[in-house]
Amino acid sequence: MAGCSNVHKRGKRWTLAEAQDFVGRFAAKGEAIQMKREALQQRKEALEERVQQRRAQKALKAARNLERRQQGMEERLQQRHTQRALKDARKLERRQQRLQQRWQRVAGHAQQALQQEQKLIASSRQQAAAAAAAASRAKVREEVKARRVAEHSRRKLRSWTSMKNLTFEEQQAAAEKAAAASAASRNTGT
């Protein structure tokens, strides 16, 4: 018993092969766990990459949708602006046509007024010419009448001077003849 100093009973001692086998199994388990961890890490990274790709695709899709929406809105706005511009252009054209029609009516009225004024001027000129001609004719008639009266008075004077040498009966006959001639000249003058 001199060689056995320990009170407790010792366990079985491993041999080198057993120890190596245990260490090998432990190392294999560790490697397996490490491989599992690496596989899990790779799977996690792959999943994260997929998630990131999906997020990126969703973001791209959303950006494309937003861009399409903005383009659609811009196109609609452009169409509205174009339609409004066309409407304004049509309104302006109609307004110009109305103004042109009014101007043509005003010009037509002015032309009619001018023609009427020219007609009035022409008729007043004709009336003035007719009045001048009538005045001229009246003047000529008056002159002719005055000449006749003067001629008649000269004849009377001559007949009176000649009648002084006549008898009473001859003077009376000459006076009747002169009165008849005067009445005849008055009838032909009027």
Image: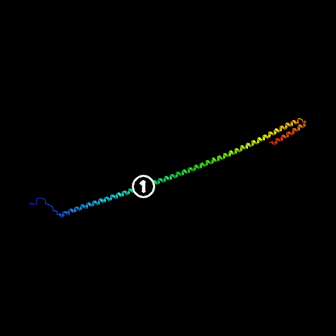
- Give the image quarter of residue 165: top right
Q: Is residue 46 above or below residue 103?
A: below
Report whether 137 appears left or right of 74: right
Q: Which residue is labeled 1 in the image? A: 67
Q: Residues within 10 Å of mark 1 (few under 14, many from 20)?
A: few
Q: Quadrant of the N terminus?
A: bottom left
Q: Nearer the viewer, residue 25 or 4?
A: 25
Q: Residue furthest top?
A: 164
Question: Residue 182: x and y, percent?
Answer: 84, 40
Question: Residue 46: x and y, percent?
Answer: 32, 59
Q: Residue furthest bottom?
A: 17
Which residue is depicted at the point 56% across and 50% down? 96
Report whether 123 appears left or right of 42: right
Q: Quadrant of the C terminus?
A: top right
Q: Nearer the viewer, residue 26 or 163?
A: 163
Q: How many numbered badges does the structure rendering display?
A: 1
- Give the image quarter of residue 154: top right
Q: How is the image coloured?
A: rainbow
Which residue is depicted at the point 42% across and 55% down? 67
Q: Is residue 27 above or below residue 109?
A: below
Q: Nearer the viewer, residue 171 or 94?
A: 171
Report whether 24 appears left or right of 122: left
Question: Residue 34: x and y, percent?
Answer: 26, 60
Q: Amino acid at mark 1?
A: Glu
Q: Element type at marker 1?
A: helix
Report whether 62 appears left or right of 42: right
Question: Residue 188: x and y, percent?
Answer: 82, 43
